[in-house]
Image: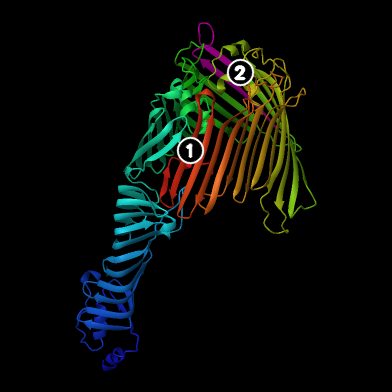
């Protein structure tokens, strides 16, 4: 014992001792010091509730003094316990309570945080404490969301006092929080009081937001979510904007986190020229296999000033939902796109594709698959607006009330080459439109059995004949009295696929082998209808009702080039990649009038014609246009597809469309061009002398992007939609952003030109705080990149 005391009294000796204890208390340090001489019956100073917890506590110090259960440590103090480490110039530890007071260059570390302070009061038993004049950071377990600025930086904080309530909860008194390492070059929120809950949220009182050390706005109460899925009830930051169509825009919204699987967003905006607008979004996940989202938007359009004559009040509702397991093997899907008028959609929708769309669809169904069969219950409504004018009967609406269908896919009969399938349905259908006086709902019964023969290939030839019959009963028709109508047709098809021609080129190109494949295909179809003239009296609701009598043959030829990396024999063969393909197809009609169904001078929409190109044919024409589909994808970062209809009688391209995508490092480009130059019924080029009477169009869309929102530096995008037929730029969008690391600024200038309803310039801006969210009127889903 004397030797031990002599060693501890050496002034030049740095004291280092480790204590292995049964609890978290440093009180066992005294117990082990006495264990050398004390009698065996003496008990260690460990609280009963901590006995049995095997841990290791380590203390390093230059010197120490012991007064009963108090330990005074001086000089390079270092205390380590479990995953916590604290260093200081001096410290005092109370063995019984577990309290620790450290002073002078205090540094506290654990897996969640790093704090530096002048003074620290910490309890190693409860893991609670407070730090005077503290600064440091707290790691937030943030998982970045799509198109939301993210950073690996922790949440930095500094304050007059920092309280550590537990390993995930901190309070800050008179301090600042930020994700920027240097707040003078970033953003910060200073507050009288703040509460940081790791992986949850930051709640501040009397908060002042600063950007580049310049005060921007004050809020008496502010909540910033740092959770994996940010959801906290409260008001969102107000947003402002400006538009030549809507005027000055100001709005705000309230978010209600109803429960962990349900929330509601209610917003209100005011357009100085138009009037008030309301928004709502409801989201729910009733179970792990189901979810639903409901979006509402409405404007009470007063139309002041030059917009008084173009008022377009209305509402829109969008619903997307699915349930993958409703019990008994059923699943359900719902997709609703409803709008009160085309004028409202064209005037107030910020999405160009949706703004120029005249269609609205509402669909919902339940389905169950078992073996080779499927049972479906469904309802739908389709509406196509014929004009934006607020006049009666300016749209065509097709409805299918809750309907039932039972379907069986190809199923083998015994073990032979015969397969059968069928489709049976019972539906309530209705159609309204200009000039149509039909019942609101009438019945339609349909039954379609089919038999297919799949014999073995003969000399590489695959021959597949099939036969089917379809019987349909309609409760109404286009006859003068709208009498019920029965339609019966029989069909026969023969699919012949000759053996493909293949050749692997002997020479390699840049380390790749090349394979050339030629694939021909021939299909013969014969459809006969009992009382073919009754086809003209069928009300067209969907694809079942546009069938017609036909006698045709379709032939096609596909050329393909495939490549794969050349590897030595015996090694795994890599996957081949198609770099080029070109398919040419055409139909020949033995009956060019389709049993008398094709009438000159009228709109003819029949399955035999639109199944290939989608464009009407001239009366009496036997050859369809030649359909060319060319695909070129030499690299994973580039692909192009060109589709064109060629006039078989000469005259070149009838219509064509091209889509192309390229990505080279930070630069990306998407190109789409589609035009209708001629049709078989209109053999002269389209003359855009009167835009309101143009039967076709030529639309070009180009989108170029640069950079990424989650990479430091500049990023941006530019998009244009140009209508060559009307010679106007219908939409032009420019977006520019800069990522400073812990925050980003984004700007957008957008212009719409959709005729007399909408000529608008918009300017929008967004401020993105890394790992927090985006503030402003430029929403993430509206960005081009």
Upstream in sequence: badge 1 or badge 2? 2
**Residue at screen point 38% across, 36% down:** 250
Where the C terminus falls, by quadrant?
Answer: top right
Between 776 and 422, the one lying in front of the other is 776
What span is colored magenta in the figure?
463-489
**Residue 478 is one of the magenta-drawn residues:** yes
Q: Is residue 141 left or right of residue 462?
A: left
Q: Is 396 situated above or below 460?
A: above
Q: Position of residue 346 (x, y in %)?
A: 49, 27
| Marks 1 and 2 in Cβ contact (< 8 Å) | no
Q: Position of residue 125 (x, y in %)?
A: 26, 69
Mark 1 Cα shell of 10 Å, populated few (<14), some (14-19), many (≥20): some
Mark yes or no: residue 226 visible: no
Between 759 and 607, the one lying in front of the other is 759
Q: Quadrant of residue 166?
A: bottom left
Q: Is 252 situated above or below 12?
A: above
Q: Is residue 217 left or right of residue 412?
A: left
Q: Is 532 situated above or below 735?
A: above
Q: Position of residue 270 (x, y in %)?
A: 38, 32
| Residue named by callout 1 | 763
Disc on res. 693: 2
Between 781 and 243, the one lying in front of the other is 243
Q: Distance between the Cα atoms at labels 1 and 2?
A: 33 Å
Considering every residue shown, the one lying at the far top of the view is: 480
For numbered disc 2, what is the local secondary structure? helix
């Amino acid at each position: 014992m004397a030797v031990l005391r002599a060693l501890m009294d050496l002034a030049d000796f740095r004291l280092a001792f480790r204590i292995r204890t049964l609890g978290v208390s440093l009180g066992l340090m005294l117990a082990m010091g006495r264990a050398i001489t004390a009698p065996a019956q003496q008990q260690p100073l460990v609280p009963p509730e901590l006995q049995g917890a095997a841990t290791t506590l380590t203390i390093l110090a230059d010197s120490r003094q012991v007064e009963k259960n108090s330990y005074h440590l001086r000089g390079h103090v270092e205390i380590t316990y479990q995953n916590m480490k604290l260093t200081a110039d001096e410290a005092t530890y109370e063995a019984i309570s577990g309290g620790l007071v450290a002073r002078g260059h205090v540094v506290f570390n654990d897996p969640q945080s790093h704090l530096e302070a002048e003074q620290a009061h910490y309890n190693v038993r409860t893991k609670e404490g407070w730090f005077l004049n503290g600064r440091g950071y707290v790691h937030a377990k943030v998982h970045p969301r799509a198109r939301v600025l993210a950073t690996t930086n922790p949440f930095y904080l500094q304050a007059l006092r920092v309280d550590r309530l537990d390993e995930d909860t901190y309070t800050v008194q008179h301090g600042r929080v930020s994700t920027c390492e240097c707040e003078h070059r970033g953003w910060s929120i200073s507050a009288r009081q703040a509460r940081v809950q790791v992986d949850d949220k930051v709640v501040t009182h009397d908060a002042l937001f600063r950007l580049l050390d310049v005060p921007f706005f004050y809020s008496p109460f502010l909540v910033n979510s740092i959770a994996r899925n940010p959801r906290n009830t409260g008001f969102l930051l107000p947003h402002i904007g400006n538009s030549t169509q809507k005027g000055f825009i100001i709005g705000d919204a309230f978010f209600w986190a109803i429960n962990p699987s349900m929330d509601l967003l209610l917003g209100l905006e005011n357009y100085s020229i138009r009037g008030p607008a309301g928004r709502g979004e409801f989201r729910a996940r009733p179970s792990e296999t189901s979810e639903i989202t409901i979006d509402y938007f409405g404007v009470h359009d007063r139309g002041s000033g030059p917009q008084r004559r173009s008022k377009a009040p209305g509402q829109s509702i969008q619903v997307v939902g699915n349930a993958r397991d409703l019990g008994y093997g059923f699943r359900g899907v719902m997709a609703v796109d409803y709008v009160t008028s085309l004028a409202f959609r064209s005037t107030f929708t910020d999405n160009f594709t949706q703004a120029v769309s005249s269609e609205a669809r509402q669909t919902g169904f339940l389905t169950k698959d078992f073996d080779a069969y499927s049972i479906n219950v469904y309802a739908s409504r389709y509406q196509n607006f014929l004009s934006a004018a607020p006049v009666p009967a300016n749209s065509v609406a097709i409805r299918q009330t809750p309907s039932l269908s039972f379907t069986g896919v190809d199923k083998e009969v015994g073990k032979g080459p015969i397969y059968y399938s069928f489709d049976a349905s019972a539906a309530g259908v209705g159609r309204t439109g200009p000039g149509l006086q039909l019942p609101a709902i009438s019945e339609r019964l349909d039954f379609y059995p089919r038999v297919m023969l799949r014999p073995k290939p003969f000399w590489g030839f695959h021959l597949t004949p099939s036969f089917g019959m379809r019987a349909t009963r309609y409760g109404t028709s286009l006859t003068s009295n709208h009498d019920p109508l029965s339609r019966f047709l029989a069909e026969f098809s023969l699919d012949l696929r000759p053996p493909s021609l293949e050749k692997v080129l002997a020479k390699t190109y840049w380390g790749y082998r090349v394979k050339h494949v030629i694939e021909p295909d021939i299909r013969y179809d014969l459809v006969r209808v009992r009382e073919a003239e009754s086809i003209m009296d069928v009300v067209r609701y969907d694809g079942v009702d546009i069938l017609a009598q036909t006698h045709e043959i379709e032939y096609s030829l596909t050329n393909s080039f495939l490549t794969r990396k050349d590897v030595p024999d015996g090694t795994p063969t890599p996957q081949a990649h198609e770099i080029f393909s070109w398919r040419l197809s055409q139909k020949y009609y033995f009956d060019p009038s389709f049993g008398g169904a094709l009438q000159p001078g009228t709109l003819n929409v029949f399955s035999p014609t639109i199944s290939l190109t989608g464009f009407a044919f001239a009366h009496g024409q036997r050859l369809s246009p030649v359909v060319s589909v060319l695909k070129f994808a030499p690299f994973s970062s580039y692909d192009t597809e060109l589709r064109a209809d060629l006039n078989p009688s000469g005259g070149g391209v009838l219509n064509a469309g091209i889509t192309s995508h390229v990505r080279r490092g930070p630069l990306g480009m998407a190109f789409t061009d589609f035009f209708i130059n001629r049709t078989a019924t209109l053999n002269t080029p389209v003359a855009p002398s009167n835009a309101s009477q143009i039967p076709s169009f030529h639309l070009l869309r180009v989108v170029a992007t640069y950079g990424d929102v989650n990479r430091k530096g500049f990023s941006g995008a530019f998009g244009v939609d140009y209508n060559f037929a009307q010679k106007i730029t219908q939409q032009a969008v420019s977006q520019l952003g800069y990522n400073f690391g812990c925050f980003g600024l984004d700007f957008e200038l957008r212009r719409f030109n959709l005729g007399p309803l909408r000529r608008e310039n918009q300017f929008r801006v967004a401020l993105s705080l890394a790992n927090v969210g985006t503030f402003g009127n430029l929403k993430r889903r509206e960005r081009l990149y």
